[in-house]
Amino acid sequence: MSKFTGFAMKKLNEVGWVEKEKPECGRRDAIIKPLALSPCTSDIHTVWEGAIGDRKDMILGHEAVGIIEEVGPDVKDFKVGDEVIVPAITPDWEDEAAQRGFPSQTTGALGGWKFSNFKDGVFGEVFHVNLADANLAKLPENVKPETAVMLSDMFSTGMMGSENAKIKLGSTVAVIGIGPVGLCSVAGARNLGAGRIFAVGTRPNCVKVAKEYGATDIVNYKEGPIDEQIMEATDNEGVDAVIIAGGNMETWKQAVKMAKAGSVISNVNYLSGADIVPLPREAWGCGMANIDIATGLCPGGRVRMERLASLIEYGRINPDSLITHKFKGFDKVEDALMLMKDKPKDLIKPVVLCD
Ligand code: NDP
Ligand code: ZN
């Protein structure tokens, strides 16, 4: 095959199929054929909200499990035919930002995010992965591709939200937004030892999975300001950690108002729709109340994927609960992406099983 097809952002607000030359492998790289794919809300922000600016004929998608079709001569640990989990974020591990401890930000802010940002994504019949030994993880034999594809971005990002929130044993946590990312933050909070976990959202499927993943209280943002609801439920104490995984700019004000002095607000939401993020000065202790704000891009790389896979293997997480819609056949990525755009009420995550 010298040419392949993929589903692309043709320009802002427009998607479609494109044909491209097969990518060159590179000595330390791999070419992968997808086995399972999933679209992300971020793809929607990218195409229809212009969140990272315009792109031309860029293949979308960054969540994949695949089978190796080609490896470069310097790849040591992987061979053709291996089934692998592909992280959404594939850092340049020799870059100085990786050495400082921020691999997702290599070569500049958000630079570890290559697929469907500044390089063709995974919604192609084949796609290229840089630094295969550092960026791929073997798919464990007892884990299905559709289950593991939930790790590439959803569990990695959502659980990072909880890790960055510095959750302590028994602490009270609010997770704002319980789409797939927020649900994984709930699972992260539970695994890190949170006591009470508030989960903010309304879709019945999401509420059900939030409870399964560890939420103790559900808060409906359509029934009044969530800071007021959570302050009332905690006798005006507030929470030790807030994870923002949905909402809008108003959410930031609410997050600060429900955060205790000495707490962390951890954002994983991909902000769009306004240029300034508002913080309520007084509730924020005039900037002196140790209400810290943490941000982060999904962690990528091999060790991260191996560790998340271990959470599946040892029964700590059940990603299958996120999968509400299954499509069969690679050409269905278009339908899966449009479903993600339309967000019907019963959707959490769609998966495409390629054949
Ligand atoms: P969803 O759109 O599926 O979920 C959003 C959630 O926010 C839903 O639970 C929704 O509630 C809730 N919500 C909507 N409006 C409000 C409001 N006003 N107040 C409180 N909650 C509200 O998104 P995903 O879970 O797929 O993704 C979440 C975010 O994470 C996206 O912005 C995505 O781009 C980003 N992301 C970031 C990454 C990173 O590396 N940092 C990586 C991947 C994704 P309801 O139940 O009513 O729908
Ligand atoms: Zn994503």
Image (cartoon, grey):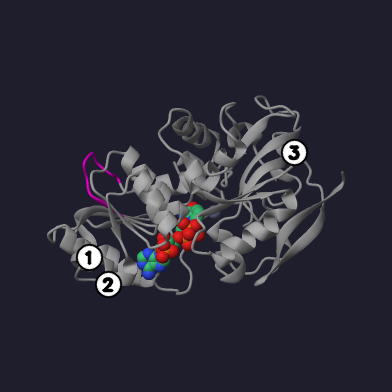
Q: Which mark is in front, 3 or 1?
A: 1
Horizontal side of residue 276 vs 236, given as left or right: right
Identify the residue at the far right of this view.
2
Mark 1 and mark 2 residues within 8 Å of each other at the beta carbon: yes
Question: Residue tagged by mark 3?
Answer: 26
| Quarter assignment of residue 245 | bottom left
- Spatial CA span between label 1 and label 2: 7 Å
Q: Is mark 1 within 8 Å of ligand 1?
A: no
Label 2 is placed on what type of residue? Answer: Gly
Question: Residue tagged by mark 2?
Answer: 224
- In the rendered view, would you say 212 is above or below 40? above
Asked whether the viewer can see residue 19, the reply is: yes
- Spatial CA span between label 3 and label 1: 54 Å
Label 1 is placed on what type of residue? Answer: Gln
Mark 3 and mark 1 residues within 8 Å of each other at the beta carbon: no
Q: Position of residue 219 (x, y in %)?
A: 29, 61
Q: What predominant SS class does the magenta segment belong to?
A: loop
Number of other residues with Cα within 10 Å of mark 2, as a class: few under 14, some 14 to 19, many 20 or more: few
Horizontal side of residue 28 vs 199, given as left or right: right
Question: Residue tagged by mark 1?
Answer: 229
SS for dot 1: helix
The stretch in magenta equals 166-174
For the C terminus, the quadrant is: top right
Horizontal side of residue 50 vs 355, given as left or right: left
Q: Is mark 2 within 8 Å of ligand 1?
A: no
Which residue is found at the position 54% from the left and 53% from the top? Answer: 349
For the N terminus, the quadrant is: top right
Ligand 1 shows up in the quarter that is: bottom left
Label 3 is placed on what type of residue? Answer: Gly
Which residue is found at the position 47% from the left and 36% from the top? Answer: 308
Number of other residues with Cα within 10 Å of mark 3, as a class: few under 14, some 14 to 19, many 20 or more: some
